[in-house]
Amino acid sequence: MKRAKLDMLFSLNQWRSIQILMFIGFVYILLVGFEVPFLLKNGFSSDSLQGFSSSGNRFLNSKPFVLDSEEYLDEKEAPIRPLDVPYQSRTERRIEEFSKSPLSRLNFSAGIMNLSPENSISKSAKEALQLGIMLWQELEVIGKNSSGSGISDINNKNDSKNEECPHSLSTPGDLFPKNGTVMVLPCGLTLGSHITVVGRPRVAHPETDTKISLLKEGQYDMVSQFMMELQGLKIVDGEDPPRILHLNPRLKGDWSGKPVIEQNTCYRMQWGTAQRCEGWKSWADEETVDDLVKCEKWIRDNVNDSKESNSKWWLNRLIGQTKKVEVDWPFPFVEDKLFVLTLSAGLEGFHLSVDGRHITSFPYRTGFALEDATGLSLTGDIDVHYVFAASLPTSNLNFASQKHLDISDKWKAPPILDGPVELFVGILSAGNHFAERMAARKSWMQHRLIKSSKAVARFFVALHKRKEVNVELKKEAEFFGDMVIVPYLDNYDLVVLKTVAICEYAIRTASAKYIMKGDDDTFVRVDAVIKNAKEVSENRSLYIGNINYYHKPLRSGKWAVTYKEWPEEVYPPYANGPGYIISSDIANFILSDFEKHRLRLFKMEDVSMGMWVEKFNSSREVEYKHSLKFCQFGCIEDYYTAHYQSPKQMICMWNKLQQHGKPLCCNTR
Ligand SMILES: *[C@@H]1O[C@H](CO)[C@@H](O)[C@H](O)[C@H]1NC(C)=O
Ligand SMILES: *[C@@H]1O[C@H](CO)[C@@H](O)[C@H](O)[C@H]1NC(C)=O
Ligand SMILES: *[C@@H]1O[C@H](CO)[C@@H](O)[C@H](O)[C@H]1NC(C)=O
Ligand SMILES: *[C@@H]1O[C@H](CO)[C@@H](O)[C@H](O)[C@H]1NC(C)=O
Ligand SMILES: *[C@@H]1O[C@H](CO)[C@@H](O)[C@H](O)[C@H]1NC(C)=O
Ligand SMILES: *[C@@H]1O[C@H](CO)[C@@H](O)[C@H](O)[C@H]1NC(C)=O
Ligand SMILES: *[C@@H]1O[C@H](CO)[C@@H](O)[C@H](O)[C@H]1NC(C)=O
């Protein structure tokens, strides 16, 4: 009887084991089917590619993006134009001039001639223009010497410019770069990289920064907190580097009165939504990261209890109680107590463990590749004893455009035809934003209205400090035919000159009816934008966008606007920069004022536009049209334009638009 029951139990167990085995097998097949290719694509492709492409044609072999999008394109079977044959069209004049040089034909020096010397633009512009002209001449010499087609040049490029990529780094605390500066991880991180910090949080001190400490006068909160950041040092110029991960343990002084760990990202100087771990374990149904919870539990109240509960746990174990006992650990950081923190890069996100225990996981966000994380900074109330970084990538395919550009005729811009161009979209882009441009080309720039030249889109790019970037840039411009190079050394204060160059090109080359300005992380619904503009009665001047009324300049802080730069107390009504539309008469007016040396220039291009339109409005009334669907922060459903979209999100949005015929957002990473 007993035996039989046991047997039955055994066979039951066996049956269960078989089920489990089958399940594991199934999961394995799934993994092999999906996960591993994913891993290959994302983790190792660059290395393996480098292996075999040194002999051959890297571009044609590599497919850096998820190209599934192609399958949904209307123009899937669009005939491919032979590479070297110049475009034949009725407007040979315009095309010829364009194909000769991607250089903007705006006379920049004319426009900045009469600026007052106090104007911050005046100083930087003259230098930047001089440098830019030199840089461009240098490029033309290189172009002539490297006889033959530029494309093959890119393909056979020698990779000897690889920087040193050490497998591991270690820095004693006293050598670790202090405040302000960062430790450089030359080639960024890769899947499986980990950084270990041995440090000691300082004892809480009265915090006098009123942004953190909010007590009455003379009274300050006691604060102890530190920040560990992974920054993208090589990604942008002229703005703060993006923070790919901002990790901020607050031992004391958080507004909740409890110790917390905040994690966040900052992309294009825009903070994301913080992930706060406050000592509660993440909900069971919440998204996990590589199967780890985002937040582990810790004892929220006092440290004394934990010792007790831990000893209770041990006691329970000794007595042999089998009841499952939850172990509660205290907050991992204690003032003046040494800790060993390890941050590792998983498949889906960063994992933080302290003293060997998992504490938090933070899913990767927008568009950053791990190799972009080239800077590590540790600031705040912390004494760093040692920093180790290991399992770092040993080859550097960084920056190189190769990885991002997909040299295929399919993505080339069609020629501008003689017929009317409804909409011209000028896209501001930075020299090294190869991936962003490629994503725009593969997504919304595939719209049938652009393919049929009813709408035209061009990137406006200034020259970069690094010659290699410029060489790539020129080749990119010549190949895709969708770039206009403004010949000055790129500088954050001079974006406004790109806006004028957009007006010039839209009027003189494209003869467009409406002119839109966007950024390279703006997703544009070309048809919706045109429809929106057409709703304004036929021959009225228009200014459409997400319009700000009565905004005041920021007068303090890093991005402050001085009274010299902007003497007035408020800005004119202006549409947010990532997506606005003007009618051609306004563009014409701007261009003509610029060339007559009387256009007032302000470093913020969107405010400048507001100012110009206001001036135009005083002689001919403009219809201002405000819509939140020109999103400034991210994306909302039914958008006209969406902003801060990573290359992956761009492709995703385009896919959704094609598949569902509806403007849907892609808020996943
Ligand atoms: C640009 O404008 C300046 C001042 O108006 C003029 O002297 C110069 O000749 C112009 N350059 C070109 C190429 O037109
Ligand atoms: C270009 O080629 C000429 C001769 O072929 C050479 O004298 C010159 O130094 C080269 N310039 C550069 C920048 O390589
Ligand atoms: C690349 O450059 C290195 C040194 O600069 C040289 O030894 C190597 O032969 C070059 N490879 C090719 C394919 O040109
Ligand atoms: C770091 O910043 C703190 C205040 O933020 C300052 O007191 C300290 O002197 C700075 N240390 C260095 C090395 O700059
Ligand atoms: C924790 O224990 C220390 C001494 O062991 C004591 O001074 C402190 O008041 C205790 N804290 C709490 C919240 O009980
Ligand atoms: C607008 O167009 C109408 C006819 O299309 C014309 O009569 C009128 O003069 C135009 N107004 C302006 C200001 O050009
Ligand atoms: C534009 O001009 C009209 C008429 O001159 C005026 O009523 C309106 O307030 C102006 N709009 C702006 C934004 O300046």
Image: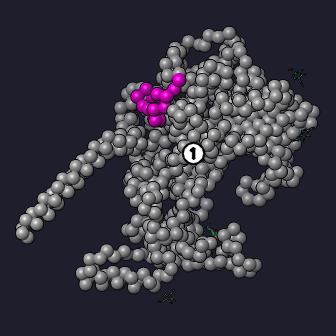
Classify residue 264 as left or right of residue 14: right
269 shown above or below 144: below
Q: Residue 490 location in percent, x, y?
A: 68, 39
Residue at image location 6% in from the left, 69% down from the top: 1
Classify residue 1 as left or right of residue 342: left
User: Is 433 one of the magenta-colored residues?
Assistant: no
Q: What range of the chain is rendered magenta?
A: 59-74
- Regarding mark 1 in the picture, which secondary structure is present there? loop
311 shown above or below 663: below
User: Does residue 172 appear in this view?
Assistant: no
Residue at image location 51% in from the left, 66% down from the top: 277
- Work out whether residue 286 or residue 244 is closer to the camera in this orientation and state it: 286
Mark 1 closeness class: few <14, some 14–19, many ≥20 residues within 10 Å: some
Q: Residue 227 location in percent, x, y?
A: 55, 64
- Work out whether residue 189 or residue 650 is closer to the camera in this orientation and state it: 650
Q: Residue 389 location in percent, x, y?
A: 43, 58
- Residue designated by label 1: 235
